Image (cartoon, rainbow, N blue to C red):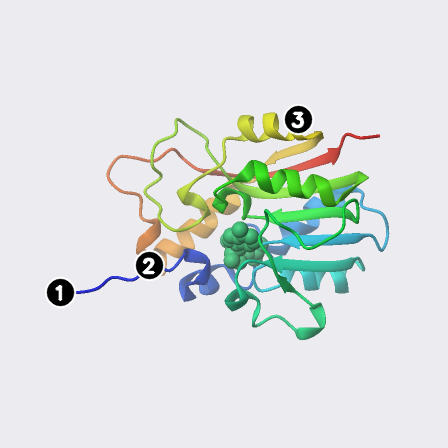
């Protein structure tokens, strides 16, 4: 009898590295730069990347944007390639090892949709942000009725309902200031993956809720 282990998530596969480089998601650092150009984070502010993967965004925000950066990921395996000097640490998005009101910005790129409990993570983001803090999210969203995407073990397995996210943000005390559609970068990455033979993203049969990609910026609404 053949034993099958747990499926390897897409973000740990060589095909994603080949298709996306060291940012394990659509849009790359260009989308990160777009977000920070809109977010107005104070100069040299403290920024936390939650689900930082290989640490590429943390490095970029530190070296190019000159922020005081921190990064956490649940997987040590993901962070092991990151330069030691970045000081990344292992933590769950729903339980962050930082003091309340201690960050000017939290960035969460293609991670929220993976989490079993999005609300708990948002509560935690709100807790560590200052009263003028900013939350930057980029992630896969639903652009049609919610069926299975046919895409397994990636952010695309469970795309976010943007309406639900906005409602949740409002309840948690955030105000959405920017919401942009970036679905083109998802299509481009998906095409590269298909041409590299990545089987997990081949939509099955006639299903598919046309997942899209969104950039959302929300400010803490405490002032
Ligand atoms: C699609 S990758 C994105 C990585 C990175 N944000 C980037 O843009 O390159 C998703 C990342 O979320 C991490 N992750 C999954 N569940 C998490 C959790 N509960 N808390 C923190 N990180 C988590 C994974 O280990 C993985 O590195």
Q: Position of residue 31 (x, y in %)?
A: 63, 49
Determine the quadrant in which ligand 1 lies: bottom right
Which residue in the structure is indicated by mark 1? Answer: 1
Q: Tell me which residue sits at (46%, 58%) in the image.
A: 11
Quick check: 46 left or right of 195? right
Q: Nearer the viewer, residue 101 or 170?
A: 101
Which residue in the structure is indicated by mark 3? Answer: 170
| First in sequence: mark 1 vs mark 3 | 1
Which residue in the structure is indicated by mark 2? Answer: 6
Q: Residues within 10 Å of mark 3 (few under 14, many from 20)?
A: some
Residues under labels 1 and 3: Cα distance?
Answer: 51 Å
Residue 24 in view of the camera: no
Q: Residues within 10 Å of mark 1 (few under 14, many from 20)?
A: few
Q: Nearer the viewer, residue 30 or 66?
A: 66
Q: Tell me which residue sits at (65%, 38%) in the image.
A: 123
Q: Tell me which residue sits at (33%, 52%) in the image.
A: 200
- Count of labels shown? 3
Q: Position of residue 196 (x, y in %)?
A: 36, 61
Tell me the mark number nearer the camera, choosing from 1 and 3: 1
Q: Position of residue 83 (x, y in %)?
A: 65, 73
Q: Tell me which residue sits at (44%, 37%) in the image.
A: 211
Disc 3 is placed on an element classified as: helix
Q: Which mark is residue 105?
A: none
């Amino acid at each position: 009898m053949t034993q099958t282990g747990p499926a390897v998530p897409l973000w740990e596969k060589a095909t994603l590295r080949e298709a996306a480089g060291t940012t394990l998601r659509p849009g790359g650092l260009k989308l990160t730069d777009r977000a920070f150009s809109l977010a107005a984070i104070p100069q040299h502010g403290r920024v936390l990347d939650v689900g930082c993967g290989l640490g590429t965004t943390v490095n970029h925000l530190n070296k190019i944007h000159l922020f005081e950066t921190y990064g956490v990921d649940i997987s040590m395996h993901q962070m092991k390639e990151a330069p030691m000097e970045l000081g990344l640490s292992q933590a769950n998005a729903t339980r962050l090892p930082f003091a309340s009101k201690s960050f000017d910005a939290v960035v969460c790129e293609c991670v929220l949709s993976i989490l079993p409990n999005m609300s708990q993570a948002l509560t935690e983001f709100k807790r560590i942000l200052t009263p003028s803090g900013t939350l930057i999210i980029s992630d896969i969203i639903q652009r049609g009725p919610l069926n299975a995407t046919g895409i397994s073990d990636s952010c695309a397995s469970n795309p976010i309902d943007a309406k639900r996210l906005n409602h949740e943000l409002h309840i948690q005390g955030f105000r959405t200031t920017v919401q942009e559609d970036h679905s083109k970068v998802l299509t481009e990455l998906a095409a590269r993956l298909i041409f590299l033979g990545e089987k997990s993203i081949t939509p099955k049969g006639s299903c598919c809720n046309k997942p899209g990609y969104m950039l959302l910026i929300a400010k803490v609404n405490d002032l």
